[in-house]
Amino acid sequence: MPKDPLEFIERLQQKSEPTRKAIATFIIVTLMLIIIAVWITTFSIAPSESAIAASEPSPFSLLWNFTKDSIGQIYK
């Protein structure tokens, strides 16, 4: 594997289109799996914080209440 990223890209550009698509698919799936794994592990990092967060309203409920209030003000 070349050390220079530009050399790697040039070698990749010389490959056939199906090969490039297969490499792109592999890289995308690998990155998605890494992101999903990190996301899932964040659920188990701090279970004691969930009790604190339960007393605070969620951002979605705040947004929903703001939207309802705004629409209510418009149609008064």
Image (tube, rainbow, N blue to C red):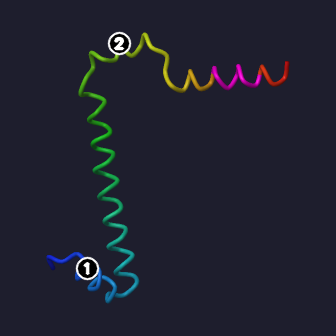
Q: Which mark is residue 52?
A: 2
Residue at point 34% right, 17% down?
50
Q: Nearer the viewer, residue 28 or 68?
A: 68
5 left or right of 16 in image? left
Q: Which mark is residue 6?
A: 1
The N terminus is located in which quarter? bottom left
Which secondary structure, mark 2?
A: helix
The image position of residue 47, as x and y in percent, is 27, 20
**Callout 1: 10 Å neighbours few (<14), some, many (20+)?**
few
Label 1 vs label 2, nearer the camera: 1
Residue at point 81% right, 25% down?
74
Q: Is residue 69 magenta?
A: yes
The image position of residue 70, as x and y in percent, is 72, 24
Which secondary structure, mark 1?
A: helix
Q: Please, is residue 42 above or below residue 37 in the view?
A: above
Region rendered in magenta? 65-71
The image position of residue 37, as x and y in percent, is 28, 44
Q: Amino acid at mark 2?
A: Ile
The C terminus is located in which quarter? top right
